[in-house]
Every structure is written in structure tokens, then in C-alpha cells.
Image (cartoon, rainbow, N blue to C red):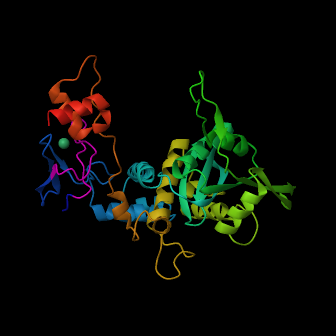
Amino acid sequence: MTTQDVFCPNSDCLARGQTNQGNIRVHSQKEQRYRCTVCQRTFAASKGTPVYRLHIERQIYLWALTLLAFGCPPIAIVRAFMLDERTVRRWHQDAGTHCMQVQHTLVETQRAHGQIQADELHIKTHGGVVWVACAMAVASRLWLGGVTRYERDHTLAVEILALVRRCVQPDTFWLCVDGWSPYVTAAREVFRSKLPRFGRLGRCEWQTWPGLVVAQVVKQSAHYHLVGIIRRLAIGEWSLAHRWFLRTQGHGVFSTAWIERLNATFRQRLHAWRRRGRARLHSASAIQATTYFVGTIYNFCTPHCTLSREHPTTPAMATGITTEVWSIERLLTFHPAIEPWEPPKHRGRKSSSELVCLARWRPDYLLPSEQHLVRLHG
Ligand SMILES: [Zn+2]
């Protein structure tokens, strides 16, 4: 057992969520428990992951989830391992929720991604249709995430582009989408920043990022047959778009082929995404969780054939998030980041003990004058 990157999960602890602060000790190797020297509480190594308090052998759980991750029908797992159907469904959902937190921790960090493609598609459920919008970085094949809604509306476009914004640095990416018009208005709404007021009164003006490029690939069809494709630039200048295109793609034309190929991978690996399948899910949240389960395993555990010319490489390795192919056990026992301890709010001046405590655990909560006070009194 190693104490590296382990944090205290206790909600009342001052050191909650903070890694490598020297407050974690191994409490019991045999029981796989740690102890926090700040709150003096012990906790299981698996706390905060889906394998915490499993009532079944871990290997059976991992086999069941590996089969689910690659498209095995849940009923086959129920029959093979003599499990309850509701148990398998709960495992699938809980693993999906965990994978969503892993993606928030590791993938949703600002990086230079180059070309990004986004697409939306509808999935049938027991109660109707759910729309899922996904985005991916083309160079590293990294799936950035997905959002679900019951309506295909402007909010769906805003939510998926807001997710893209959390993953990119300004002026280091360009976007290629299909002909659905809300992407363009949503991109103007999401990829913008405040203009400085230079002492003037009133609200800040917003400006769309000057280097933003959004290309659209509009497919024209008649009687369900493709009759033509129009490629146009919805936002940005052609010279800039051409430069981006040469740098990130090199040859060919604007297309949404990569995200459509990724959609096919999801359809292959997730029973709820199949066009003519009968194993439907019930809600948008269930679809989102199971989609994240498949997407995170695609990112971290599955080498991508177009990246693996020299050695097996996953999209997460190509992005630089990790240096090796993860096993599904490693993914499901990874501890996603949790919110650190929040100091209680109160009126009046802070006491000296409170200042010492803040200086040690939440220095970002100290005012400049208080920082001076703490330095003065050591
Ligand atoms: Zn603690």
C-alpha cells in the first residue's frame, strides 16, 4: 500500500481531498485501511469508488463490468454468474457515475487539442427518445464527454460546447460540426470572454474569441439518401481556418468522420445505443452514466489501432494524461478528486487559531492583510 495520491475522504476533516500533505498513514495492510493524522479517522482504501463495500468477490464484479463494457447483453451476465438483474443494472450505473467523475478529474482540464468534432444523435428509451451530444479531440482520438437531454434544443448545443470549453485553452483549437444551426449560436455564446472596462462604469462587454473557427459540414438528403455535402465556415476567417486545417489534419476536407466513427464504437459496445435493439434504458441519466462508462474505458483502457503503430497507445496516453494502458480494475479503483474542506462562514474577525488553520489547509481563503498577520506571528 502506498500513501501517494491518497486523500482523507472525511467530510469534516481539514485535510479533506488534499493529496501528498503528509497526513495519511497505513492503518492496516491486511484490511487495506488508511488513517488520517488530522482527524484521526481510518478509512478503507476503496472508499469513494464503486468497489467499496462489494458484497461479492471482486473478480466476478470485474468480469461482469468488462463484459458490459464491450457490449455483452446484461441478461447473459445475469445467467452466467447467477446474479440478480437489478444488481447488474446497479453496478453498470454506479460504474458509469464513477467514470463521469474520473473524466471530470482527468479529461476536463484545459489543453491544446487542435481539431475538435461534435455530433448529436437520438437514442430510443422505454419512454421516448433521448438526445446525446458528444465531442472528441481528433488528433488524440480522446472522447471529451457527452451530455443528454430529452429535447434537441439550443441548451443541448450550449451544454456540449460548455464541456468542450472546460477541456480547451483559447486559440488552440477549432471546431468541426454538422449542419445543426444551434451549434453556431451556442459557440458564440460559450467561447467568449469579458472585455476590460478600463475604469468605465457599467457591465463588461462580451467578445467572441477572435481566433475562433467553426466549420460546418452540411449533408443534404432526399428520401433518406445523401445527395450532396456543403462545407462552409460558420465562424472565423478562411485564412485562419486553412492554417488550422493544414496544421491539424494536413489533407482531405472538412468532415465529421471521426466523431461518427466513435458513435459507431458506442453503438457496438452499448446495448442501449443500438438502433434496433430491445435492451432499452429508462432515463436520460441512465443513458448518460452508461455512455460515460463506455467512453472512459475507450479513453483509458483500450489501445486505439490508429495510434498504436509502435506500441499500444490509448487516447489518454496520446493526450499525455497517463503513460500506460489502464486495466478496468485500475479505472474502477481510481479516486476522483473531491471538494476540499470549506471553512465555515461567519461575521467579524477571524481568530488566531482559525488563521493558522486556514494558512495550513486553505491559504486561498486568506486575505492579503491576514496573510501578513500569519507571517508576523509565524
Ligand atoms: Zn482526515
Percent position (x, y) of residue 5? 27, 56
Q: Quadrant of the N terminus?
A: bottom left
What residue span does the magenta drawing correspond to?
Answer: 4-24
Percent position (x, y) of residue 223? 87, 55
Percent position (x, y) of residue 14? 21, 38
Percent position (x, y) of residue 329? 34, 63
Q: Quadrant of ligand 1?
A: top left
Q: In which quarter of the view is residue 268 placed?
A: bottom right
Measured along the vertical axis of the image, is residue 159 above or below residue 318? Answer: above
The answer to which of 203 and 245 lies nearer the viewer is 203
Report the predominant secondary structure element of the magenta stretch: loop
Q: Residue furthest bottom?
A: 310
Q: Quadrant of the C terminus?
A: top left
122 inside magenta stretch: no
210 relative to 104 in the view: left or right: right
Looking at the image, how many numbered discs can be counted on the residues?
0
143 relative to 244 in the view: left or right: left
Q: Residue 150: tell me if it is visible.
A: no
* Residue at image coords 43%, 48%: 97
* Residue at image coords 22%, 37%: 359
The answer to which of 245 and 83 lies nearer the viewer is 245
The answer to which of 165 and 119 lies nearer the viewer is 165
Q: Residue 77: tell me if it is visible.
A: yes
The answer to which of 316 and 166 lies nearer the viewer is 166
14 inside magenta stretch: yes
Q: Residue furthest top?
A: 347
224 relative to 40 in the view: left or right: right
* Residue at image coords 34%, 63%: 330
Measured along the vertical axis of the image, is residue 368 above or below residue 81? Answer: above
Measured along the vertical axis of the image, is residue 222 above or below residue 140? Answer: above
